[in-house]
Amino acid sequence: MSTQHRSRNRAILRFILLPMIFLTVALLGGLRIDSETHTFIFLPPPLITLILSVMLVTLCVRGGAINLRAWVSSDQPVLTNVSHVLTLITLYFASAQAFNTVLPE
Amino acid sequence: MQHKLIQSVGIAWTILFAAFIIWIYATEPRTFKEVAAGAQAVTGTYEIDQGRFNSALDLFHREQFRAAREEWVLADPGMRDARTQFYIAYAFYREGFGRFYYDKDLFKQGLDAVNRAIDLAPEGTLKVDDPDLQMHTAAELKAELEQGLEPSLGDINPFKIFRKRK
């Protein structure tokens, strides 16, 4: 029973929570609040952050932090592969927005 | 089976959230009110506050242009109603009109509002049947505002003081 719970919780973490965290970073990474008018300013990621993000994700793959074969493989069901690809895409945009947050405007 | 359900929910939720983020960055709302109004517009449930619109119209007819504009802004917080944006532009025009000179700042804001009205109008054509107005279409108002912003030799014509506000 506990194995079943563990498996379900892991699935929720991997397929729901993880993309949510990355997408939240992607949403808030470009958000600024105008100090005078207290209004939102949304800054889309500039090209340099997209390039840096490609480099970061490549580094993660080359460094072994992301095992691409384990994430996307022909042995896995289609739904799992689609979910993993979406998570990787959200990771990419979250990285871009994280760079966007720290880069001076 | 349960795994498949979790995966499907995860995929759907991720796509929805991603679409929301794209929409937010495309529309660039400035306040939570605008976010709500934008969401209402997307779902087709956006409506202006008709009571505020009417009270603004009343103020406009009494030449209280600034107060009228403030009421219209409250009536249409999402800036999604072409007619309201047209009236806001008209209020800028009437307030900015002067016999000796036009207030260029007000005319610029009027031009922004009328452009919004044209963008929102179906096929870019907007006609307002109000007997109090001399210009009934957004195109006429836009031309008038643009004319007021362009410097010309006519600006030094002394007979300019006889021109009439539309």
Image (cartoon, coloured by chain):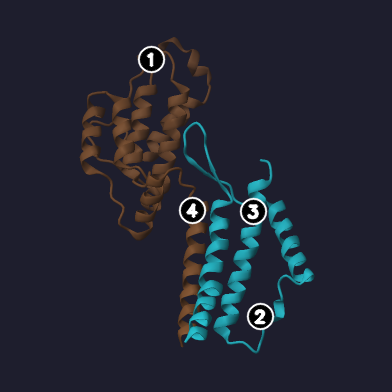
Please, which chain is the residue tagged with disc 2 on?
A: A
Q: Is residue B109 above or below residue B160?
A: below
Q: Is residue A29 above or below residue B145?
A: below
Q: Check the image and name the residue furthest to the front.
A: A2
Shade of chain A as shown in the rendered figure? cyan
- The residue that label 3 is drawn on is A98
- The residue that label 4 is drawn on is B24
Identify the mark at residue A72; answer none if there is no mark: 2
**Percent of width and height locating residue B85:** 36, 39
Image quadrant where residue A69 sits? bottom right
Residue type, numbered disc 4: Ile
| Mark closer to the chain start, 4 or 1 | 4
The span from disc 1 to disc 3 (Cα, nearest Å) is 54 Å
The label nearer to you, 1 versus 3, is 3
Shade of chain B as shown in the rendered figure? brown
Residue type, numbered disc 1: Arg
Residue at image point 45% right, 36% down: B112
